[in-house]
Amino acid sequence: MRKKRIAVIGLGDFGIELVKRLYEDGQEVTAVDQDKGKIDRIQEFSTYCVAIDSTDESELKEHGLDEMDAVVLAIGDNFENLIVTADALKKIGAVNIYARYQSDLNKRVLQMLGIENLFNPEEQAAHSMAEQLANSSVKGVTLLGEDYRILETVLPKQLQGKTVQGAKLREDWNLNLITVRRPKKSRRKSDRKEEEILGIPSPNLQLSEGDILVLFGKNEDLERLMGKR
């Protein structure tokens, strides 16, 4: 599989972590920030890094931002800079632009510029934590727009012992099972709990107590399943 060329503009805490994760995943990552000190710190964790003015179209083009498979705008502390950079990227023909927003106003302005892939890390983290605090069965949440999400939840009691096919997640709940996380058996209670990812579940896979289902679906359908525990 060909490595993807991905640029991350804005090296705050989120941007730095994203660069590191992408680089560890084997992608070709270009890190961009105006602060040379941040560029020096990220150098060993990126394929290429450069300190430039991201609002300057000629500099963006000179460093190949128009040739990336995706560009992530992770600027979080300067909305004017974010907007001008987004506009500059559109003008040089950059594709698959992902932009961080911090308020509804930010979001609307970015949408007016034609940026479709918008995200808010704080909103995602807060939503996930709120669900986990409110329901101990929830182990993780990823929002996908306003209507859909990926939910990681402990297997409901009524599905224990059933096969994937017998659980009828598609037929009865309108949900897609992405995978199953299963705790590994340990001989000693003191051993740190580990788990394995079971890949794409086969219809004959038997679901067991302690399994964590990774489900995709509409919010209302996921909530319906959670309410039937």
Image (cartoon, grey):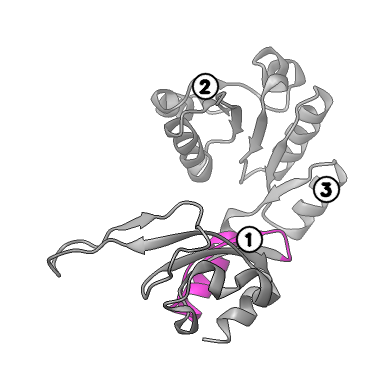
Q: Quadrant of the N terminus?
A: top right
The picture places residue 89, in percent across and down from the top left corner, at: 76, 28
The region drawn magenta spans 123-147
Which numbered circle lies on residue 111? Answer: 3
In the rendered view, would you say 209 is above or below 84? below
Q: Amino acid at mark 1?
A: Leu
Q: Which residue is mark 2?
A: 49
Look at the numbered disc 1 and give the secondary structure of its residue: strand
Q: Is residue 113 left or right of residue 228?
A: right
Name the N-terminal-most of marks 3 and 2.
2
Which numbered circle lies on residue 143? Answer: 1
Look at the numbered disc 3 and give the secondary structure of its residue: helix
Residue at 46 percent across and 38 percent down: it is 21
Taking depth in this image into account, of 67 and 78 the one nearest to the observer is 67
Q: Amino acid at mark 2?
A: Cys
The picture places residue 66, in percent across and down from the top left corner, at: 73, 21
Q: Amino acid at mark 3?
A: Gln
Residue at 58 percent across and 54 percent down: it is 121
